[in-house]
Image (spheres, helix red, strand yellow):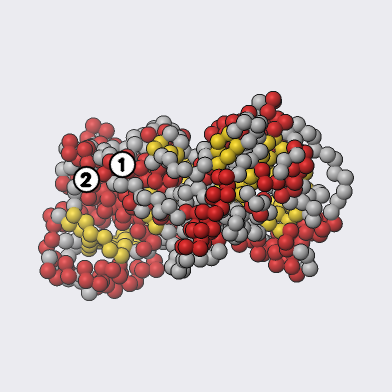
Amino acid sequence: MQTASTMNHYEEELEKLDFTYSLALAADVSELKNAIAAASESSIIGVGSGGSFTVASLLCNLHEAFTGRVSRPATPLEIICNPTLASASPVFLISAEGKNPDIIEALLRARRHSARSVHVLTNRKNSLLTESVAELTDIKTHIFELSQKDGYLATNSLLMDAVLIARAYEELDGKNKIFPPSTNALTLNGKHIGEWLNKAASFVKEVVKRGSIIVTYSPMLRSIAADLESKLAEAALLHCQLADIRSFAHGRHLWLADRASDCAILALTEPSLDGLWVHMESKMPPEVPRLTMSTGGGAPLDIIAGLVTQMYLVSIIAKELGKDPGRPIVPQFGRDLYYTDLQKFVPKPQDSGDHGERSKYEVLGARWPSKLLQGPMRRKLEACKNSLERQKFKAIVFDYDGTLCTSQRKDAPPAEPVLKELIRLAEAGIVVGIASGRGGSIQEHFREILPHALWPQFKLGLYNGGWLTNIDEPQPAESKTSELLSHVTRIVGRLQDLGVPIEAIKTTQPYQVSVRFREGIATDQMWFVVADALRQAGLDLSRMVRSKHSVDVLASDVGKSHLVAQIVQEFKIDPYQILTMGDQGAWPGNDAALLEHRYSLSVDLPSRRMDRGWKLAPSHKRDVDATLWYLERVRTLDKGEFQLSFAEHHEKIGAISL
C-alpha cells in the first residue's frame, strides 16, 4: 500500500473515489429521474467534452438500452455547428465545473433553437455555466455539488455523475438492483477489480513498450472504451484506436499483420459477446499482447465497475511511463486552445426567415422532403401579418401553461419578464384575459404578484373557460353535477385499473375531467387511448382536448373561447379588437378554440386555418420565449389600445446576445 507521500496527484484522486461513490449513492436523484422519465418517449442528445463526454455516452447508452430510443452523445462543437440537432430532442449538457467555454456556447445555441427541453448536469453551484443558465429561460439544472476538484483528467466528477445517471435508470426500471455500498465491493464478472488489475500488470509493460493500444469493445460498454481512449490521449500516455468487436474485423486487423510489434489489444466484453471474442482472439497472431476485461453484463452497475477499473488501469500505465496524468505540464498554447472565443470564430446559423410558413406546413403534415408551394403560403402569411399590424386592439387573451409560463406539471406563476409585460399592458388600460385548464391556484398567484390596483384589468377563464371570474372572486360552490363527466371519470378509471399509465384523474364538476399521465408519457399518444375508450362508449370526442401535460374532457358548455365572449360583453369591446395567444392551436390541442378567433397568434403549434392562428415568432423561439417575442412588438397607444409591429430587430435571449 502506498502512503500519501509516495502517491502522485492522479493516484490521490483515485483514493477519494470511494468517498465520491458514497456521495452519489446518498444523493437525491428524484429530479434527474423525472427528467429522464420525461424524455422516455424521445431520443436524447448528451453533450460533453473529455470526461463529461464519457458521462454523455453512458447516458445515451442507458437511454437506448432501457427505452429503445436511438440516442447519441455529441461534443459541444457538434451542437454549436448544427444547433438544429437540439430542435426536436431533449438535450442534456454535462460539465463538471461549468467553466468549459465550449459547453457554454453549446447551451446558448441549443436554447436559441428551443430544444423541447434543455437539462444541465453539473457539480458546481456557482460557475460560468450556471450564470449563463440564470440568464435564459426554461432550462432545468441538476446540480450535485462535489467539493473534490479533479486534476487534469476527470475522475471523481466522472464517477459521481455516472453513478447518479446509472441509479436513475435502475430506479426508474423498478427492478431494485442494489448498488454495493463501496467501490471495494464492485466486481468484474464476479471477481474483485484488484484481481483483474494484478493480471493486467504484465500486459501493461508490453503495451508501454509498443506505445499504442487497440481497444475493442461490446457496444454495451462503449462509454468505458470512450473514457479509456480519452484519458490515454489527453494525458499523452498511449496512442489508442477504438473499434467495436466486429468493426475491428472489418480491416483494422491489418495492424496485427503489418505492425504486430507496435500494438496490443484490450477487449471490453460482456457475456453476449464473450464467445465471439474468444473465437476471434484464437485467430490472431500469438505475438500480439492481448487482455480481456469481461464485465459480466451491460447493466448500469457493470458499467460503473468497468469505468472504475479502467481509471486504475490508466494509473498503472502512467506509473509504468513515469507520468502523473492528474497534473501534467500544460503548455500555454494548450490553454490558449482551450479558451478560444468560439463566438468569434464559429458563425451563428442564419435564420431562414420562413418560420411562419414552415410551422404552418408542419401542422398540415407537409414536412421535409414534401414539395412546398411557397408562393400561395407566403401570400397567406403576409395577408395575416398585414391584417394584424393594421388592427388596433383593446384586449389580449392568453393561454397559461406553455404561453405565459413553462408548460409543467407543477403550478407556478409567470416569470419576471412575462409579468413585467403583463403589467405594462394593464397599466396602459388594456384588458388582459387568461384562459387555463387550471383552477383557483392561478388567482392565488396573481394576487401575490400583481399590484392590487391592476386587478380589475384582468379576467380569468379557469377550468378551460368553465369558470369565468376575476382575480379576487371566490370560487362558487358546486351547483350541479354533469353526468357526462361522471361517466367519463368511470371510463378513465377503468383504463387506470387495467394498467394504462394514468397518474391522476381530476374531476372538477361541472367543468371538466383532467387526466394526467405518468412522467414522460406523451399526451399526443395517450389522447388516442382515452378517445378510443370514449368512442366505444358512444361519447362525443369533440369535447376532448389535450395540453402538453394532460388530456381534458370538457362539459358541453365549457371552452376557452367563452372568455373572449365574456370580455366582449363585460367591457363592451368589439370582438375584432381582441387578440388571442396560445401554444396548442391545432385540434385536439386545448387552444384550438382560442386560436379560431379572427386575430390570433400561436407560440408553438399553429392553427390549421390559413387566415389566423399563425406562429410568426422565429422557429427557434417557442412557448414563453415566443410570447415575449410577440410582447416586445406590442406598441401601446392612447385610449387603452395597442398595435403590433413585426419589424425585425436585433435578437436577444435574456441578457445574452445571440
Front-most of 416 and 359?
A: 359
Q: Which mark is residue 166?
A: none
**Which of the two discs, 2 and 1, sits closer to the camera?**
1
Splitting the image into 4 quarters, where does residue 343 fall? Answer: top left
| Viewer-nearest residue: 223 or 383 | 383
Q: Name which of mark 2 and mark 1 comes first in the sequence.
A: 2
In this image, 343 relative to 123: left or right? left
Q: Secondary structure at mark 2?
A: loop
Residue 232 appears in the rendering? yes
Q: What amino acid is labelled 2 in the image? A: Ala
The x, y position of residue 606, in whole percent, is: 57, 55
Q: Is residue 484 left or right of residue 261?
A: right
Confirm or deny contact between disc 2 and disc 1 (CB under 8 A).
no
| Amino acid at the residue labelled 1 | Gln
Residue at 20% across / 58% down in the picture?
Answer: 213
Work out whether residue 77 or residue 609 is closer to the camera in this orientation and state it: 609
Q: Quadrant of the C terminus?
A: top left
Read off the residue under disc 2. 235
Q: Is residue 655 left or right of residue 490?
A: left
Q: Position of residue 589 (x, y in %)?
A: 64, 56
Residue at point 82%, 56% (across, down): 486
Distance Cα–Cα, label 2 vs label 1: 28 Å
What residue is at 25 percent from the left and 40 percent from the top?
Answer: 340
For the question of whether residue 161 can be seen, the reply is no
Quarter of the picture containing the N terminus is top left
Please name the residue that numbered disc 1 is placed on.
Answer: 343
User: Picture coordinates of residue 394 (x, y %)?
Assistant: 66, 38
**Pointer 1 local density, CA inside 10 Å: few below 14, some 14–19, many at least 20:** few
